[in-house]
Amino acid sequence: MVQSPPAGRSSQPPLIAAALKMHGIDGAAVPRGALKVARERCRDCRNTDECSVWLAGMSEPEEYRRFCPNAALFDALPNARAH
């Protein structure tokens, strides 16, 4: 049996949730399979320092494409803002 996260907590790793928000993407609108893969990529990513800097707005908006394993997904989603 799969347990739900505690109330008020997202089932997404913190950085993927923040990245989706940064791109203006509603996580609920992402196909379930794609979101699962994105969460796994984020969880296994070794670029958390670069990601945190980007999420804090301390690098160019397009910089995520250089280090993020989910960049292609973010760019492909129709909700994504143009960068």
Image: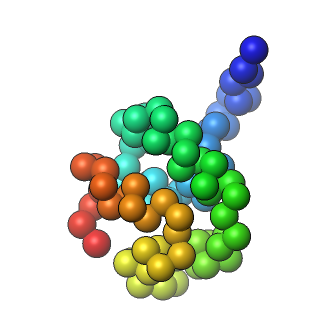
Tell me where residue 22 appears, x and y as whole percent. 43, 61
Residue at image x 64%, y 37%?
11
Where does the N terminus fall, quadrant-wise? top right
Tell me where residue 25 appears, x and y as whole percent. 37, 49
Say if 16 sits above or below 64 in the image: above
Q: Is residue 23 shown to the viewer in this render?
A: no
Residue at image x 37%, y 78%?
62
Say if 30 sits above or below 54 in the image: above
Q: Is residue 58 shown to the viewer in this render?
A: yes
Residue at image x 63%, y 48%?
40
Picture mark count: 0
Residue at image x 43%, y 64%?
71
> Residue 2 or 52: which is nearer the viewer?
2
Residue 9 left/right relative to 80: right
Tell me where residue 12 appears, x and y as whole percent. 61, 43
Say if 10 sits above or below 60 in the image: above
Farthest residue, direction bottom: 59
